[in-house]
């Protein structure tokens, strides 16, 4: 085995690889890697579609080689390097896909003041008062008001359901609405 400093840069891939694996001297690996640096960069660019990311990936791949070539048996370096490069890029893309960045829009955030909760509580109080006022109505008015306002039934359907005539239903709804208004204003 000839030391790298005595090797010419045109030594075979196998000789440079053998030298690196035997001595772990990075100058042998650097000569070997630089032969295929354009291939590595081009492959990264094909997958990552960004020059800066491709340069970063090329450097990361060199660092992978420093470790992997100490334990891996490689018979055809150029083909093996291409596979390592492709796998590195695919793993990088997979990681980026998992990491979804969502920009938080201020208008989607809950406001710091909680005044909207006061409105919700006020509506809840009004509904409680309304329910109490409905309970104070005469039984026929209660029945018709619930069907008309809460179940959204029309006069004709209410008349059919209750057996009352249409004019009676209309009168109960109007009188019930007036009585509810008076009761709600009293409790206000």
Image: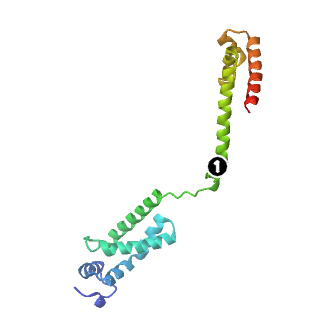
Colour convention of the picture:
rainbow
The C terminus appears in which quarter of the rendering? top right
Q: How many marks?
A: 1
The image shows residue 65 at horizontal and vertical percentages of 33, 73
Quadrant assignment, res 19: bottom left
| Residue 39 shows in this picture | no
Return the residue found at the far left.
1
Nearest the viewer among 90 and 37 is 90
**102 left or right of 160 in image:** left
Quadrant assignment, res 181: top right
The N terminus appears in which quarter of the rendering? bottom left
Circle 1: is it few (<14), some (14-19), or many (20+) Cα within 10 Å?
few
**54 left or right of 146 in image:** left
Seen at 30% across and 90% down, the residue is 5
Seen at 51% across and 68% down, the residue is 50
Return the residue found at the far bottom.
6
């Amino acid at each position: 085995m000839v030391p790298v400093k005595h090797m010419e840069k045109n030594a075979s891939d196998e000789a440079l690889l053998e030298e690196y694996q035997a001595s772990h001297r990075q100058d042998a690996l650097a000569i070997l890697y630089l032969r295929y640096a354009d291939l590595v960069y081009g492959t990264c660019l094909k997958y990552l579609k960004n020059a800066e990311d491709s340069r970063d990936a090329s450097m990361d791949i060199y660092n992978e080689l420093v470790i992997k070539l100490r334990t891996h048996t490689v018979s055809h370096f150029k083909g093996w390097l291409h596979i390592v490069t492709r796998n590195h890029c695919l793993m990088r893309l997979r990681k980026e896909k998992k990491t979804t960045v969502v920009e938080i829009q201020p208008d989607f955030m809950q406001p710091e003041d909680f005044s909207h909760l006061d409105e919700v509580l006020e509506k809840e109080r009004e509904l409680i008062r309304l329910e109490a006022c409905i309970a104070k109505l005469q039984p026929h008015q209660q029945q018709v008001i619930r069907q008309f306002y809460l179940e959204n039934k029309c006069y004709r359907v209410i008349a059919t359901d209750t057996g009352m005539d249409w004019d009676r239903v209309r009168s109960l709804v109007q009188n019930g609405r007036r009585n509810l208004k008076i009761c709600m204003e009293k409790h206000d």
